[in-house]
Amino acid sequence: MKKDKAASGAAYLGTQSVCARYDDVAPATIWRWRTDPELGFPEPIEISGRLYWSVADLECWERSRPLANASAPPLPRKRRNSHDHLEIAPAQPAPKRRVRSKAEG
């Protein structure tokens, strides 16, 4: 059935185009949306190991989202540096090394 759907002449978008459609989200974000049953993100079809989404299915999903008519992406996203959660202590001088005299041995 999936091949019939693709052969019908409907417009389809690849993963990179879907990422660009939603404010250049990462492919991993699309994967998370697909695996979250509460979001109801459309299922893609697979052709030669690549994923493609029906434009009609994406548009239907967009209309079902609370922010469908807003200029923001349909889901909140937060970009941050992977080190944002780390606290960096102020630099401290290196401890002075004690030099032994020949008498100490």
Image: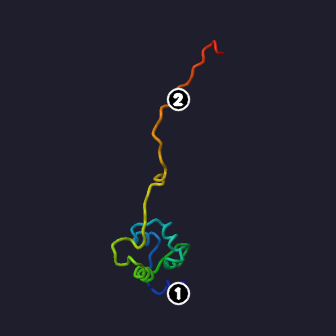
The crowding category of the residue bearing disc 2, from other C-alpha atoms within 10 Å (few below 14, some 14 to 19, many at least 20), is few
In the rendering, which numbered label is found on residue 4?
1
Give the answer, above or below, for where 78 lies relative to 42. above
Type of the residue with mark 1: Asp
**Residue furthest top as drawn:** 103
Give the answer, above or below, for where 35 lies relative to 63. above
Q: What residue lies at 43% left-to-right and 63% top-to-bottom?
A: 78
| Image location (x, y in percent) of residue 100 | 60, 18
Of residues 34 and 50, which is closer to you in this image?
Answer: 34
Type of the residue with mark 2: Pro
Q: How is the image coloured?
A: rainbow
Give the answer, above or below, for where 96 lies relative to 14. above
Label 2, label 1: how many angstroms apart (C-alpha)? 73 Å
Q: Are the residues tagged 2 and 1 within 8 Å (C-beta)?
A: no
Give the answer, above or below, for where 76 lies relative to 46. above
Q: Earlier in the sequence, mark 2 or mark 1?
A: 1
Identify residue for label 2: 95
User: Judging from the image, what secondary structure is the residue with disc 1 in?
Assistant: helix
Whether residue 103 sits left or right of residue 56 in the image: it is right
Whether residue 5 sits left or right of residue 62 in the image: it is right
The crowding category of the residue bearing disc 1, from other C-alpha atoms within 10 Å (few below 14, some 14 to 19, many at least 20), is few
In the rendering, which numbered label is found on residue 83?
none
Residue 10, picture quadrant: bottom left
